[in-house]
Amino acid sequence: MIPGLRVPAGILFPESFLHTPWFAIMATFVAIHTVMYAALAVSKLLPKVHRPNWLRPRHERAETRSIYPDGPR
């Protein structure tokens, strides 16, 4: 800050504007989007998580459709 330079309070918005419901809604909206952006940025930094091998693949059927019910799936 430059010595001797004083910025009057409320130069951008009057103080009464900061206490309006509209400003509170916009501040909440910006806060939620900031947290979401930060979470997405952190998730891009983490390594990719792969499904465990003990889970059945999506293309594999739960039951056999063969005429041999005891055969391989």
Image (cartoon, grey):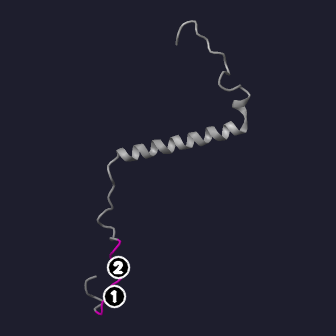
On screen, residue 53 versus residue 33, left or right, reads left
Q: Residue at x 62, y 40 (%)?
A: 28
- Looking at the image, is 49 positioned above or below residue 7? below
Helix or strand or loop: what does disc 2 sit on?
A: loop
> Residue 68: x and y, percent?
28, 92
> Residue 30: x and y, percent?
57, 40
Count neighbours of disc 1 (C-alpha within 10 A) and say few if under 14, some if 14 to 19, many if 20 or more. few
Q: Which residue is mark 2?
A: 61
On screen, residue 65 versus residue 25, left or right, reads left
**Distance Cα–Cα, label 2 vs label 1:** 9 Å
- Which residues are the magenta region? 58-67
**Direction top: furthest residue:** 4
Q: Which residue is mark 1?
A: 65
The quarter of the displayed image where residue 58 is located: bottom left
Helix or strand or loop: what does disc 1 sit on?
A: loop
Q: Specify the principal SS of the magenta part.
A: loop
